[in-house]
Amino acid sequence: MFDNSRYLTCGVDSTIPIELQLFMWECVERLPEPKDYLQVFELKPVGNLQCITHTSEEPEYRMEYLLPSDDPITEKLYVIDDDSHSTMLLSSEY
């Protein structure tokens, strides 16, 4: 899973800085097998840091990251894998 073509929606492209997009793809890549087909990322500001909470349900997984940021954002994203490709999208686009 997740070792395939990657896509993102126009919403992600216009809202999420490329550095954060790459960071989240890397988070998914580094997960041990088995990986849930649905990965959830919640972004929120913590002072001048970007907090990213990465979760999945099966198997249960939760990791929180704090990254330096000049302009932290609040957003929820999904990365969905269907065996042929993976798509990153905003929760509002789901």
Image: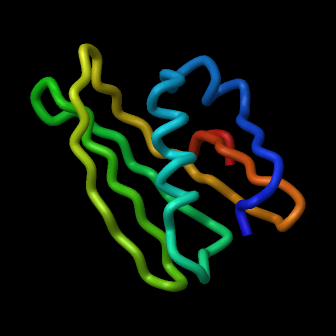
Quadrant position of residue 20: top left
Query: Relative to residue 33, is residue 56 drawn left or right?
Result: left
Q: Is residue 64 left or right of residue 82?
A: left
In this view of the protein, which residue sits in the foreground, 34 or 77?
A: 34
Depth check: give the residue in front, 15 or 91.
15
Q: Position of residue 65 (x, y in %)?
A: 27, 49
Q: Foreground: 52 or 29?
A: 29
Quarter of the image for residue 53 reads: bottom left
User: How is the model colour-coded?
Assistant: rainbow
Quadrant in which the N terminus is drawn: bottom right
Number of residue marks:
0
* Picture layout, residue 71 above or below residue 58: above
Looking at the image, residue 72 lies above or below residue 62:
above
Above or below, 44 relative to 78: above
Q: How far across and down, in percent of the image, does residue 31 sit?
A: 50, 68
Q: Position of residue 67 (x, y in %)?
A: 25, 35
- Could you tell me which residue is drawn at 55 percent across and 62 percent down? 39
**Residue at image location 75% in from the left, 53% down from the top:** 86
